[in-house]
Amino acid sequence: MQKKLYGLMAEFDSATDLVDAANRVREAGYTKTDAFSPFPLHEIDEALGIKRSILPVLVFFGGLTGLCLGIGLQVFVHYIDYPLNVGGRPFLSWPAFVPPSYELTILLAGFTAVFGMLFLNGLPRPYHPVFNVPRFALASREKFFLLVEAADPKYDYDETKAFLGELKPQEVFDVEE
């Protein structure tokens, strides 16, 4: 029975080794890659060629939607559906509309941020094939890992394994599905 591979993963000792390896992997033409480290590495996004997220744009439009809904709801209630003139005040009292509109803006922007982040990150994902590699448990403590997926167009098992070996990792692992 032949095992189905998700990809190949190389283990490194330091963050600089991981970033250097990620740069070389990207320069070699691999596009379906990922890196794992025990702490955030700000230069790894550029090293892997990861583009900026669309999440800030989604949050802006979520907040704009909240603002429009807040104002629209109040205009509908106070001017169209149930106009009630108390003490000669105007139906459309804009200063009174500010707090509820602001709160709805923050609410929808926050929901968009949370659910957009979950959706864009593909979460929740309780299982990932890298968990099949026993040494991957060290990724949250002291080791750094670089993964090249088998779905990558340039992926060839022998060539990719040899290339990862040239990057001087501690070890190269087969990641089974």
Image: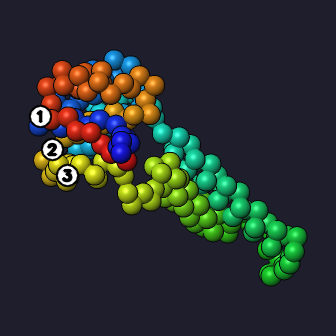
Judge by depth and name the residue closer to the eye, 76 or 35: 35
Residue highlighted by disc 1: 170
Image quadrant where one finds the N terminus: top left
Residue highlighted by disc 2: 143
Marks 2 and 3, the one that precedes in the sequence: 3
> Is disc 1 placed on a helix, strand or loop?
loop
Q: Quadrant of residue 20?
A: top left
Question: Given the image, on which type of amino acid does mark 3 rest?
Answer: Pro
> Is disc 3 placed on a helix, strand or loop?
helix
Judge by depth and name the residue closer to the eye, 100 or 109: 109
Residue highlighted by disc 3: 134
Residue 25's spot in the image, x, y percent? Answer: 30, 23
> Left or right: where does residue 25 sit relative to residue 62?
left
Q: Residue at x 30, y 21 (%)?
A: 159
> Left or right: where does residue 144 sit relative to residue 103?
left
Question: Given the image, on which type of amino acid does mark 2 rest?
Answer: Lys
